[in-house]
Image (tube, rainbow, N blue to C red):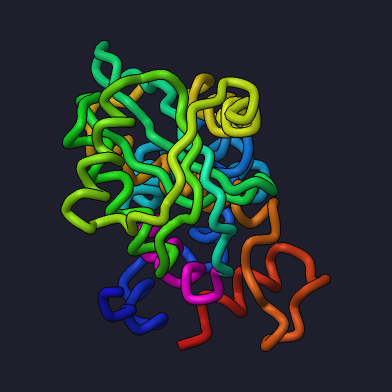
Amino acid sequence: MSKLKDIDGLFNGRHFDREVIILCVRWYLRYKLSFRDLAEMMAERGLSLVHTTIMRWVKCYTPEFVKRWNRFAVAAGQSWRVDETYVRIRGKWTYLCRAVDRAGKTIDFRLSTRRDVAAAKAFFVKAIKTQGRAPATITLDGYAASHRAVREMKTDESLPRRTKLRSSKYLNNLIEQDHRSIKSRVNVMLGFKRFRNAAVTISGIELMHRIRKRQFDLTSMHLKDAIAPSIWKAVLSTR
């Protein structure tokens, strides 16, 4: 993990208080609100800002928020259900590869312009690094490139030979249902213009989804039952 920025330096020089910035970014990633919706909501609270300011906040602060929350992430299970869904960027379809464990906990995700063996391998490498361990079982749909990627990774020992590969449309219903939470937020947006912006925004949406699924251990800060603003303040302030 790259070094975290100092919390004061992170917001230094901003015209608005950090609480306003955090609130706008969090609400945009969590709820089906546009940048203009949020600008109007802030205006009702006496804050005058343009929607492009909130857009820049999302782009700037989402990666830092993800890094800070990931310090408290709890490893998911070792039975992975992997599947791809689609996201449109600049009028073209891109591929969002995602995985959950047998309990529905998010394992990882990766946005890619291609759907091939190399992309599948890149996702598995990223997911193993995120989880800190290889899966015991990988369940895929019938797409041949994903199966080939697993076989080749087992051959070159990027995956343990003991990892079991199986294909089951029924078992992968879990991940297909889980896609809905991400797609329902993405679909109401006006569309992404750049791949980088899409990747950053989706990482924030995925973060909110993981928070809802209680995939973080905050007991060290006694925040298990705290309200959202208190959780965010504590997580972002902790070094």
- Report x, y in % for residue 85: 43, 23
The residue shown at (44%, 61%) is 66
Q: Is residue 205 left or right of residue 162?
A: right
Q: Quadrant of the N terminus?
A: bottom left
Q: In the image, is residue 169 above or below residue 36?
A: above
Q: Residue at x 39, y 20 (%)?
A: 86
Question: Which of the 4 image quarters holds residue 195?
Answer: top left
* Quarter the C terminus occupies: bottom left
* Residues rendered magenta in the picture: 61-73
Res. 8 in view: yes
170 falls in the magenta region: no
Residue 138 x %, y %: 47, 43
Q: Nearer the viewer, residue 34 or 183?
A: 183
Query: Predominant secondary structure in magenta?
Result: helix
In the rendering, at what x and y percent does residue 45 appear?
Answer: 66, 49
The residue lying furthest to the right in this view is: 225
Question: From where the camera sits, is residue 190 visible?
Answer: no
